[in-house]
Image (cartoon, rainbow, N blue to C red):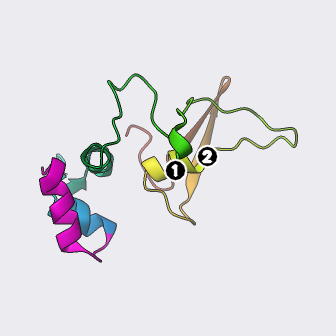
């Protein structure tokens, strides 16, 4: 897995490839138990941010959002009843417009699972 200036150079070299190909080209790939590959987008983007000088700290639940604000990892129900998950969080997970999720309701909790995924992941 490339890091630092090597990672930045590789991303620049690969240019217009898809995000999956960028992650694969930088070496952020592991194998699942069934032998298929798993692309480690989170590790790739964390390394890319570090290489660009954005420190994610010790992983204590805070990340830098727009304008240097810290992400709170909390959400508040709005007056109209909507619960908003901000762009900074969806960007961290490389979510795209149109991505679908199953909503799992529990006792005082909501879980969003990518449509078609196993509940155990």
Can you say whether 22 is above or below 52 in the image? below
Name the secondary structure under disc 2: loop
Say whether residue 95 is magenta: no
Say whether residue 17 is magenta: yes
On residue 90, the disc is 1
Label 1, label 2: how far apart the Cα atoms are: 7 Å
Whether residue 50 sits left or right of residue 71 in the image: it is left
Q: Contact, CB < 8 Å: mark 1 with mark 2?
A: yes
* Mark 2 crowdedness (10 Å alpha carbons): few <14, some 14-19, many ≥20: few
Residue in the foreground of this view, choosing between 93 and 33:
93
Whether residue 106 sits left or right of residue 58 in the image: it is right
**Label 2 sits on residue:** 86
Range drawn in magenta: 1-18
Q: Position of residue 86 (x, y in %)?
A: 61, 46
Q: Position of residue 73 (x, y in %)?
A: 55, 30
Give the quadrant of residue 14: bottom left
Q: Position of residue 25 (x, y in %)?
A: 16, 64
Residue at the image position 54 percent from the left and 44 percent from the top? 67
Residue 35 visible, this angle? no
Can you say whether 103 is above or below 18 in the image? above
Q: Main secondary structure of the magenta part?
A: helix
């Amino acid at each position: 897995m490339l890091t630092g200036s090597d990672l930045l150079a590789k991303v620049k070299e690969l240019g217009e490839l898809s995000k999956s190909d960028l992650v694969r080209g930088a070496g952020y790939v592991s194998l699942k138990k069934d032998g298929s590959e798993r692309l480690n987008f989170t590790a790739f983007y964390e390394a890319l941010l570090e290489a660009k000088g954005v420190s994610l700290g010790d992983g204590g639940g805070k990340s830098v959002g727009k304008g240097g604000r810290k992400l709170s990892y909390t959400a508040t129900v709005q007056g109209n009843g909507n619960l908003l998950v901000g762009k900074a969080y969806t960007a961290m997970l490389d979510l795209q417009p149109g991505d679908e999720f199953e909503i799992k309701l529990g006792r005082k909790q909501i879980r969003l699972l990518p449509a078609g995924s196993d509940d155990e992941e």
